Image: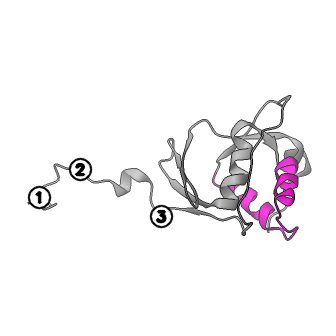
Amino acid sequence: MRAIDSDVASSVQTLRSTITAAVLDSGAVLLDLESKYFYALNGSAWAIAQLFESGASIDAAKAQARAWGAPDDGHVDAFIAQLQRFELLESSDPLSVAPDVEWHGSWTTPSIERQAEPLQNVMVSAFDPSIPLAE
């Protein structure tokens, strides 16, 4: 697992403004409107991601995850590193108020899964003659 730089860990991070979320019973799906990739997050991952919607430091997000029941086993660090690798987070100005995210589910290892191809490669035109018409 890649360690998170201490300067980055204490700086405020937010989800990029090009990220939109659809909440599901078991988590959420994020769509990056810039890259057109979808990301499926389980419930624990969505709880952490919500902390970054308004802005939070990585240290604060890790502390909140521990308060929700996450063990200190590196999985939260790995999840946040994935958010960074997928470029879903960006640096932001410090906030005077910490985000208030409630979590009442049972804690599981946070997971994020990026779809194999961006949306524009998955979608097909309704006017494509190679697609049979519905009868």
Identity, as a three-letter code, of the amino acid under mark 2: Ser
Residue 85: horizontal and vertical position, in percent? 68, 55
The alpha-carbon separation of the residues under discs 1 and 3 comes to 27 Å
In percent of the image, x 72 and y 61: which residue is there? 79
* Magenta stretch encompasses residue 118: no
Q: Secondary structure at mark 1?
A: loop
Amino acid type at mark 3 = Ala
The three-letter amino acid code for the residue at tag 1 is Leu
* Marker disc for residue 125: 2
Question: Mark 1 — residue?
Answer: 133
Are dots 2 and 1 in contact, CB under 8 Å?
no
The first of marks 1 and 3 along the sequence is: 3
111 and 102: which is toward the camera: 102
Q: Quadrant of the C terminus?
A: bottom left
**Residue pointed to by mark 3:** 116
Q: Nearer the viewer, mark 2 or mark 1?
A: 1
User: Which residue: 65% across, 49% down?
Assistant: 87
Which residue is at 78% across, 38% downward? Answer: 99
Q: Could you tell me how far apart the alpha carbons at marks 2 and 1 are, in whole angstroms? A: 12 Å
Count of numbered labels shown in the rendering: 3
Magenta stretch in the rendered image: 58-86
Q: Is residue 9 above or below residue 95?
A: below
Q: Residues within 10 Å of mark 1 (few under 14, many from 20)?
A: few
- Determine whether the residue tagged by mark 3 lies in a helix, strand or loop: loop
| Labels 1 & 3 near each other (Cβ < 8 A) | no
Which residue is nearer to you in this view: 69 or 87? 69
